[in-house]
Amino acid sequence: MPKSRTLYVCHECGAEFPQYFGRCSACHAWNSLEEQVEQPPPTSLQRFSWSNLSPEHPEGSPEVTKPGQPRSSFRLSQISDQSQSRMPSGYGELDRVLGGGIVPGSLVLIGGEPGIGKSTLLLQVANRLSHSSRVLYVSAEESGQQVKLRSQRLGVGVDEETDPSPEPENGNSQPSATTVDPFSEQLKGRRQKKSNSPENGQKNPPPKSESVTPQHHEDNLYLLPETDLEVILRELESLKPQLAVIDSIQTIYFASLTSAPGSVAQVRECTSALMQVAKRENITLLIVGHVTKDGGIAGPRVLEHLVDTVLYFEGDRFASHRLLRSMKNRFGATHEIGVFEMVAHGLKEVSNPSELFLGNRDEFAPGTSTVVALEGTRPIVVEIQALVSPASYGSARRATTGVDSSRLLQILAVLEKRVGIPLSKLDAYVASVGGLKVEEPAADLGIAIAIVASFRDRVVDPRTILIGEIGLGGQVRPVSQLELRLREAAKLGFKRAIIPRGQSPADLGLQILPVGKVIDAIIASIPAQPPTLNDEF
C-alpha cells in the first residue's frame, strides 16, 4: 500500500514544499505554509470520477462510451449550443455580471466579507429560480431552523408580483400572513421523500406540505443542512436539481481526509468532487467562499482556477448599497458590476446606479466635480469631492476614499509642477461619493478639477461632465469608450462635457469642449469669480 507523506502547502498559491519555510518561494507570502499529510487516493471519491458516473448528456450532444470506459474525442461542431442556453436568475443585475444569465453546469464562486449579504442574495436567487426549476440549498453553516427564520424575514414564498409588506414602525419584523414556509415539511424529515423516489417508479415529485399545495413553486426549493461531502454528493445525484447553492465551501469536509475543514486539502478536494458531479449532471453550483483579512478568497489559489466564475460581493457596512463584481468569467466579460440595495426584506437590485451615486447632491459645494467611471461595459456617473486645507503638522497629509492613492499623488505633482498650484504643504482629501471605487485613469481630469476648485473655493458647473486621463506632462490623454460615457451623461441631464482633444464623438445633445492641457480644462470649468445662489449655470 502507498504510504502517506508530510507536505507543506501554501494557502495563498497552493505551492507544495517538502519542508517548512517562513516564506513561500512561489508567491513570496510570509507564514503561509500549512502542514498537510498526503494520504493515498480515497476509494470513495473514485465513484464520483468523470468516467464512472452514468452518462446523461443533453439532447444534441455526441454519445460517449459506457461507464468505466475512457472517453473518446468528438468534433466541436457536434455539440448543440441549444443545450447550453443561459438560464435567467430572476435578477437583471446578477445576469449582467454573469454575462447574460446562468450557464447550466457552471461553477460560480461568490466571496465577500462576513455579513455583507452573500447568503441573503443566494437564498433570494434560489427562491426566484424555484418558480421554474428544482433548486437545492445546502446550508453548512446554519441549521434548518435558522434558514427557516431567515427565509421568513426575506419573504421567501411571497408572491413575486407584489412586494412584501413593510416592517412595522416599532421595528419588529413579523412574517406576513401570505408568507409560505417552503422548508417546514423538509425539516420534519428529509428522508420521507424516499417513498416517491425514482426507484419506486415515480418521477421524484416534491415533498408535500400542509401549508403549501404541490402546485406552488416553493415545493421546488429543497434544503439540506449538511457538512459531509459524501452526503451532499449523494443528494445531488438523487435529486438532480438544476441549481444548487453551497454555503459555504470552507465548512464542508471529506471524512477520508485527516485535515480540518477549511484547510487547503479539504477545500481543494471538496471543490474538485463538486465540480465533477456538477459538470457530469449539468448542475449549476453557486458556491460561497470566505475571505481572508486581506480581502482575498480563503483557501488555495487553485480554488479560483477550478471554478468558472469568481464574483466578489462588496460594500460599505455603513451604506445600504452593495456591489457584485466579476473578477473571472469564462462565459462573459470581467470587471462587470451589479448594484443592489439592502432593504428591510433583503436585497433589491438597482437598475440605474448613476442616480444612486448622484443622490442628495449639493450643486453649490466647492471642490466637487462629476466623472463617468466605466465598470466593465457599464458607465456610472460618480461625484468626486476634494478638500484642500493647510497642513496641521509639518508634513502634508493625503487621504483617499474610493480613489487610488497613487493616482492622487501623481495628479498633485502634475498640478504643482505644470500648473503652478502650491499643494506640497497642503492636506488633500479626495473621495468618491457613495463608496464606489474609481480606479481607472479616465477620472484623472475630474479629480484634478475638484482639487483646484477646492483650492480656489470655487464651484464647478454641476451640469458639466469631465472625462480624461492626465499625463505627467500635464496633457489630457484620450480614453476608451468615450461615446458610451457621454451617452450616459446625456441621459442624466448633463449639458456640457470636457473631453480630451482629438476625440470626435457623435452628436448626443451635449456641448463638447475638447482640451489638450490640464490648464485648459481648469479655465473651461472653474469660474474666475465665486457664483451666488441666484446665478444660473
Image: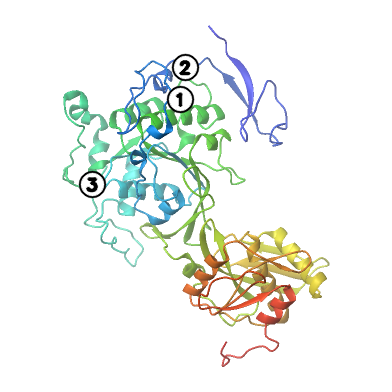
Q: Amino acid at mark 1?
A: Phe
Q: With respect to residue 66, does 357 lie above or below? A: below
Q: CA distance from mark 1 to mark 2?
A: 10 Å
Name the colour scheme.
Answer: rainbow
Which SS class for mark 3? helix
Image coordinates of residue 257 in percent, x first then y, are: 50, 21
Q: Is residue 308 left or right of residue 415?
A: left
How far is disc 3 from disc 1 in space, using C-alphas? 33 Å
Mark 1 vs 2: CB contact within 8 A: yes
The label number, if any, that marks residue 254 in the structure image: 1
First in sequence: mark 2 vs mark 3: 2
Residue 200 lies in what quarter of the image? top left
Q: Secondary structure at mark 2?
A: loop
Identified at 36% across, 23% down, the residue is: 64
Which mark is nearer the camera, 3 or 1? 3
Q: Secondary structure at mark 1?
A: loop
Residue at mark 2: 42
Badge 3: residue crowd in 10 Å (few <14, some 14–19, many ≥20)? many
- Which residue type carries mark 3? His
Badge 1 or badge 2: first in the primary sequence: 2
Q: CA distance from mark 2 to mark 3?
A: 39 Å
10 Å neighbourhood of mark 2: few (<14), some, or many (≥20)? few
Rendered residue at 49%/77% (across/down): 493
Query: Percent x, y for residue 63?
Result: 34, 25
Dot 3 or dot 1: first in sequence order is 3
In the displayed structure, would residue 432 be above or below residue 174?
A: below
Q: Give the labeled residue for mark 3.
A: 217
Observer-nearest residue: 74 or 490? Answer: 74
Within-10-Å neighbours for mark 1: few <14, some 14–19, many 20+: many
Badge 2 vs badge 3, beta-carbon distance below 8 Å: no
In the picture, the disc for residue 21 is none
